[in-house]
Amino acid sequence: MKKLRQYIGIFIGGILLFFLINPFVQTHSELKNVVLQVQWLGIVLSFGIQILYRTLYIFPFANLLSALTRKKISFRCAFTLFHLSNITRYLPGRIWGVVRLLSLSHRFGLRKTVVGSSLTLHVSIEAALGGLIASSLLFSGQIRATVPEVLEKVPGHTLFLILPVVGLLIGILFLIFKVTKQVWTSVKKCLHLLGNAPLWRNVISCHVLLWGCQGLAFFLFIRSFFPVAWTEAAVLTACYAFAWIVGFLSFLTPGGLGVREGLLSLLLASYMPLSQATLVALFYRVWILSTEIILAGVALFLYKKRG
């Protein structure tokens, strides 16, 4: 059994490596002549802020867990549980991060419905705030000028199929009685939180801070490759939020791989040549994944020490 787990781990690592390298292979001919000048101080600062963001990301999740269980859930417990499972979201299917999170919940003395409800609220608030930030792109004349080009790059049949596919997935989901029952149980568990104003104030404030950290990390990363004025920080944060939302809603790629980078490269083309923008977008995915791997390693260490 131990050997089987090792083989499965190698297999999963191979899949992650494939999805990480694949975008570079697909764009190799376009990017082989691209030259980037790197400011390493900005890279280091960006990496540090990204680590901070990924660490602070657990606070609202832990607060929601505590509220739903009506007992104090430690930051260490929530950190270990979340980051042990987070890295598996890059596997094909988009559900394995959640599946892993739920499968580990009993080892931390938590029920699956509580963990699932907390994660749903956590991610929903993050996505809602990300959507609000992304909507600010409508007020950027420079970005609005690139929107027709962005739409031209998306094949017509893809746009045509998005709604039917999403509708079909939702329909199948709610036709399964067991899933419907689970969703309803989670909703009922969340209802008693509606009147808890301090909880929502803390959770939403944390998510606002988190988006600020993520935007700053992204801006510093871009500035390390191309001279961008500090006045563009808000617009670049909105660009990232828009690409993040679309990647989050993508059902076809693990972790939004490819989709997010494609949109980012088109949006960043307002600030730098498209070839450079493509390479920077791909490098930023590597940057994000490297922080997630580091924190997954820390979570694994804490988990083994706990056991």
Image (cartoon, rainbow, N blue to C red):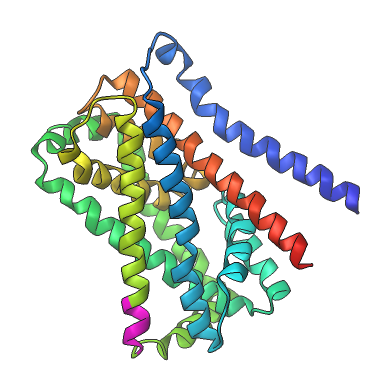
Above or below, 91 against 37 in this view is below
Task: Where is residue 148? Give x, y as percent.
Answer: 17, 33
Residue 190 image offset from top left, x and y in percent = 44, 84
Instruction: Look at the image and tell me whether residue 141 can be seen.
Output: yes
Query: On screen, 58 above or below 64?
Result: above
Residue 236 in magenta stretch: no
Q: Is residue 180 left or right of residue 235?
A: right
Quarter of the N terminus within the rendering:
bottom right
Q: Which residue corresponds to the image point at 20% horizontal and 28% vertical from the top-left?
A: 270
Question: What is the residue that sits farthest to the front in this orientation?
Answer: 41
Residue 273 placement: quadrant: top left
Does residue 198 show up magenta in the picture?
yes
- Name which residue lies at 72% across and 62% down: 303
Answer left or right for 36 relative to 287.
Answer: left
Q: Find the magenta span and give its range.
A: 196-201
Per the picture, the main secondary structure of the magenta-coloured stretch is helix
Residue nearer the viewer, 281 or 292: 292
Q: Is residue 90 above or below residue 103?
A: above
Along the line of sight, the residue nearer the viewer: 184 or 247: 247
Residue ID at (36%, 49%) = 214
Looking at the rendered image, the quarter that the C terminus falls into is: bottom right
Residue 18, horizontal then vertical, whole percent: 62, 32
